[in-house]
Image (cartoon, helix red, strand yellow):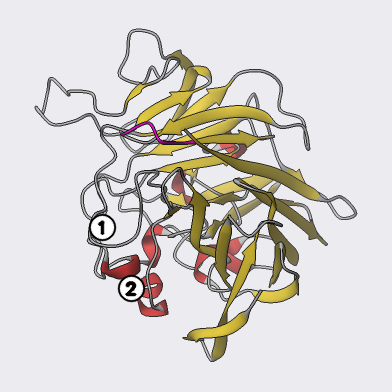
């Protein structure tokens, strides 16, 4: 286990921390900028494989920070319509960062764009923290956030989020890693179109043209959004002639209870030699296929991370939940603790 300086941001050192499984076969590097997963390597039948897109230098994360590579997104992940909400009788206006006038992932200065503090670490885990002051991004309350990344066993990568506040405030965090189970390092990074995806959901949150939920829970059956059975991500779009583009929240089956994990998705490499299951206690997964990414820097090991080089499976509350009382809510009160657990479980064929 090693801690080293990865660069400097906003007047402070950005640290990189290496962790590994007890047997040393699964390794990860976490950086304090954005509390981001810099690299994650898992064993396969032939050799270790990096499965998360990243950059060799901090400048890559800063130049492309709008994509939140590997970072914690918040204070409220995903979208808040029109950058406004009410708590009780008080209205709040928060940063907007989408051309359509909405807020996504906390705006231009969300938690994924901050340099976190290293709080604790050992060979198998690391905990990072950040204190977001009252009024930060327009949200009320002094919010103390932490995330613990750990590798309890071979191929098991665990994320545990916690947050506390001194005023009522909305909180919903997620991780925004771009996965490529075919390999995310070096010049051979391929698109994800032939990787096979399963999402354990019968419905999705229908959205308008700005990707803001309408309130309807629509069925996936008979649509390009149907991943109930494992299938390649590629789906021909009859309107454009190009592969269908995905940026959508799926309504996971069953209840969502803090600390009780259920499988939400599985992605299998193009050759079938590596699979990753996503387990979570959250009610939704936002599947983003990475198609629009236009990166300004080479990736890990000089990788050319182009069209659909990685995909996101963002475990979280449903988008714009604060404006939809029937959606699961997450208004954190003083004395309570926000908690969220997600695990990525890898298996070599």
Mark with earlier residue (2, 1): 2
Instruction: Examine the rendering and report whether any part of residue 171 can be seen.
Output: no
Q: Is residue 272 magenta?
A: yes
Q: Please name the residue shown 44% across and 33% down the image.
A: 267
Q: Position of residue 69 (x, y in %)?
A: 43, 60
Judge left or right: residue 117 versus residue 285.
right
The circle drawn on residue 63 is 2
Quarter assignment of residue 122: bottom right
Distance from label 2 to label 1 (Cα)?
14 Å
Q: Position of residue 142 (x, y in %)?
A: 75, 67
Instruction: Examine the rendering and report whether any part of residue 138 can be seen.
Output: yes
Quadrant where the N terminus sits is: bottom right
Badge 1 marks a residue whose secondary structure is loop
Judge left or right: residue 62 versus residue 333.
left
Q: Please name the residue shown 51% across and 49% down the image.
A: 43
Q: Residues within 10 Å of mark 1 (few under 14, many from 20)?
A: many
Q: Residue furthest front?
A: 46
Front-most of residues 172 and 161: 161
Badge 2 marks a residue whose secondary structure is helix
Range drawn in magenta: 271-275
Q: Position of residue 230 (x, y in %)?
A: 41, 20
Front-most of residues 84 and 4: 4
Question: Is 282 placed above or below 139 here?
Answer: above
Q: Is residue 17 magenta?
A: no
Front-most of residues 142 and 153: 153
Quarter assignment of residue 334: bottom right
Q: From the image, give the main secondary structure of the stretch colored magenta.
A: loop
Residue of label 1: 305
Q: Residues within 10 Å of mark 2 (few under 14, many from 20)?
A: few
Q: Please name the residue shown 77% across and 32% down the image.
A: 260
Quarter assignment of residue 324: top right
Q: Position of residue 32 (x, y in %)?
A: 58, 73
């Amino acid at each position: 286990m090693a801690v080293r300086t990865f660069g400097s941001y906003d007047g402070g050192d950005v640290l990189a921390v290496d962790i590994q499984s007890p047997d040393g076969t699964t390794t990860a590097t976490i950086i304090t900028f954005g509390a981001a997963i810099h690299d994650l390597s898992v064993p396969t039948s032939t050799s270790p494989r990096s499965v998360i897109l990243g950059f060799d230098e901090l400048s890559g994360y800063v130049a492309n920070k709008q994509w939140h590579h590997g970072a914690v997104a918040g204070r409220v992940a995903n979208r808040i319509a029109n950058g406004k909400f009410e708590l009780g009788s008080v209205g709040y206006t928060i940063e907007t960062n989408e051309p359509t006038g909405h807020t996504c992932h906390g705006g231009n200065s969300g938690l994924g764009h901050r340099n976190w503090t290293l709080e604790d670490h050992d060979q198998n885990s690391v905990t990072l923290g950040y204190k977001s002051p009252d009024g930060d991004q327009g949200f009320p309350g002094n919010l103390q956030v932490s995330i613990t990344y750990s590798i309890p066993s071979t191929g098991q990568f665990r994320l545990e989020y916690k947050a506390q506040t001194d005023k009522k405030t909305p909180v919903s965090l997620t991780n925004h890693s771009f996965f490529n189970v075919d390999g995310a390092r070096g010049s051979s990074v391929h698109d994800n179109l032939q990787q096979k995806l399963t999402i354990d959901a019968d419905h999705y949150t229908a959205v308008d043209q700005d990707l803001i939920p309408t309130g309807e829970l629509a069925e996936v059956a008979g649509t390009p959004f149907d991943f109930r059975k494992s299938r390649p991500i590629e789906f021909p779009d009859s309107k454009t002639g190009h592969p269908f583009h995905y940026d959508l929240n799926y309504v996971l089956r069953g209840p969502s209870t803090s600390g009780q994990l259920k499988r939400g998705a599985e992605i299998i490499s193009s050759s079938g030699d590596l699979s990753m299951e996503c387990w979570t206690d959250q009610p939704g997964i936002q599947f983003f296929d990475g198609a629009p990414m236009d990166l300004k820097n080479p990736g890990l090991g000089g990788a050319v991370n182009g069209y659909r080089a990685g995909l996101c499976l963002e475990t979280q509350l449903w988008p714009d939940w604060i404006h939809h009382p029937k959606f699961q809510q997450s208004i954190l009160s003083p004395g309570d603790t926000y908690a969220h657990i997600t695990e990525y479980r890898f298996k070599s064929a």
